[in-house]
């Protein structure tokens, strides 16, 4: 049993809690100290950095690289830093997410704005997302070392089987859509239009009234599709998801083009007696053929595929004990990665504290934590977003992890003092300047 004195020192020195008492260790947690990665079932798929907010992306990427460089045993081979990509999104709110299949980490701009003078709060979020990738959450079958005692394995297994059945049905339907698009010549005919970069300027004189700005924007997007979806055009079955996205983009671009041309329907109804010059007549026929296939076949079959839903009761991603455990594990593994990078232990929970303060729950949580026999519940009755309650995450990190790994965390915490990384000062300032709205 850990001593009361040791617990008080850890809680105050590492997390600045007002008081702390010896507590029963968390029985359902199986975080193994030093196990910060598992072998992926298949290599990470390629990804690309985002092009929006380039200054913020550069800062986020370098901060993540700082963490990874100081965790060399984790971030090597399959998880080498070069395999990770970063995007800064303009979606509102404090949030971030990762794709364990690609190593792509998306951070909302508000997360970057949150701490203009320090790196630690954003670093904590990045460490959490890096942990999701290295632990391959949602991409692999759960290993014994990951399973909490309150997880119903039979129920999880049932849901995973139901999910696989649904995925097979979706893939079969998607393949059918692609096969028909190939047999009908739709993909071939559309790819010809994609490569004809003069087409949209060539037909402007014959369109009548147009919304010039919208038309040119849509025409430009369509003309770039041959670059974006080159592999899908050359080999539609090589990556069915890329081909599916291409087909979806074709529909979207045609919708935007037709919306910018009030007389679009009249234009595509070819009349050979008035269709001059001859090449414009052929352009009309090609566009009409593609548009007819979209409306009669492609859009309805794609909508039908998208309508194949998995009942939330059969979805493992809606099974709170499993989802909430993965978030807990990402908290714990992320904490290790964060401390090994030399960042201040006392500020790993800054993000959680901000959320609790916003919800007016922080003071209540801290008061409850002081009670020796109180434990924050991890499993909630209402499934919201898969995360355990904030107070559970806070108590788990500030108390339970300290008790379970007292020796290891004490050794790391004595060296973990950084709130801001000096080498990142210019990048951080540039990111904040670029994200600050101009007055």
Image (cartoon, rainbow, N blue to C red):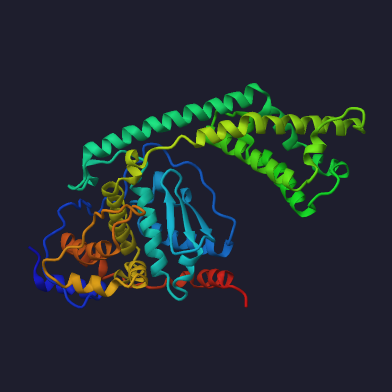
x 38%, y 51%: residue: 75
- Expressed as whole percent of the image width and height from the top left, the position of residue 274 reads 92, 32
The answer to whether residue 141 is left or right of residue 253 is left
Front one among 90 and 237: 90
* Residue at the far left in the pictured view: 1
- Expressed as whole percent of the image width and height from the top left, the position of residue 142 reads 28, 41
Does 54 appear above or below 154?
Answer: below
Q: Quadrant of residue 273?
A: top right
Does 245 appear above or below 425?
Answer: above
x 56%, y 28%: residue: 177
Front one among 267 and 181: 267
Does 369 appear above or below 140?
Answer: below
Does 81 appear above or below 235?
Answer: below
- Expressed as whole percent of the image width and height from the top left, the position of residue 78 reads 40, 44
Residue 46 appears anywhere in the view = yes
Q: Tell me the quadrant of the picture where the C terminus can be found.
A: bottom right
Residue 197 appears anywhere in the view = no
The answer to whether residue 217 is left or right of residue 375 is right
- Expressed as whole percent of the image width and height from the top left, the position of residue 158 reads 28, 34
The answer to whether residue 139 is left or right of residue 304 is left
């Amino acid at each position: 049993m850990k001593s009361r004195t040791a617990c008080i020192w850890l809680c105050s020195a590492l997390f600045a809690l007002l008081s702390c008492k010896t507590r029963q260790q968390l029985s359902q947690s199986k975080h193994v100290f030093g196990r910060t990665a598992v072998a992926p079932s298949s290599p990470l798929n390629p990804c690309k950095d985002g092009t929006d907010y380039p200054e913020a992306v550069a800062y986020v990427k370098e901060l993540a690289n700082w963490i990874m460089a100081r965790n060399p045993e984790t971030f090597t081979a399959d998880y080498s830093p070069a395999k990770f990509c970063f995007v800064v999104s303009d979606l509102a709110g404090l949030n971030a997410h990762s794709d364990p299949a690609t190593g792509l980490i998306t951070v909302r701009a508000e997360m970057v704005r949150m701490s203009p003078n320090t790196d630690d709060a954003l670093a904590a979020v990045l460490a959490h997302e890096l942990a999701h990738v290295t632990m391959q959450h949602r991409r692999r079958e759960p290993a014994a070392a990951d399973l909490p005692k309150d997880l119903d394995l039979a129920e999880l297994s049932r849901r995973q089987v139901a999910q696989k059945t649904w995925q097979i049905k979706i893939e079969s339907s998607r393949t059918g859509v692609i096969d028909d698009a190939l047999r009908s010549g739709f993909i071939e005919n559309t790819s010809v239009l994609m490569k004809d970069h003069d087409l949209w300027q060539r037909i402007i004189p014959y369109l009548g009234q147009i919304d010039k700005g919208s038309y040119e924007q849509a025409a430009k997007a369509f003309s770039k599709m041959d670059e974006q979806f080159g592999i899908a055009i050359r080999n539609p079955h090589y990556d069915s998801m890329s081909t599916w996205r291409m087909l979806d983009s074709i529909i979207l671009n045609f919708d935007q083009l037709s919306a910018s041309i009030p007389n679009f329907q009249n234009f595509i109804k070819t009349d050979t007696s008035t269709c001059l010059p001859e090449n414009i007549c052929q352009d009309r026929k090609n566009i009409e053929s593609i548009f007819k296939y979209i409306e009669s076949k492609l859009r309805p079959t794609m909508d039908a595929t998208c309508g194949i839903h998995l009942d939330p009761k059969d979805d493992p991603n809606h099974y709170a004990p499993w989802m909430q455990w993965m978030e807990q594990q990402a908290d714990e593994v992320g904490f290790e990665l964060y401390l090994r990078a030399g960042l201040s232990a006392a500020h790993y929970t800054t993000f959680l504290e901000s959320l609790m303060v916003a919800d007016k729950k922080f003071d209540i949580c801290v008061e409850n934590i002081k009670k020796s026999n109180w434990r924050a519940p991890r499993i909630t009755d209402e499934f919201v977003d898969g995360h355990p309650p904030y107070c559970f995450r806070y108590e788990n990190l500030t108390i339970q992890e300290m008790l379970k790994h007292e020796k290891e965390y004490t050794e790391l915490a004595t060296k973990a003092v950084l709130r801001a990384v000096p080498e990142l000062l210019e990048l951080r300032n540039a990111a904040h300047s670029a994200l600050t709205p101009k007055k």
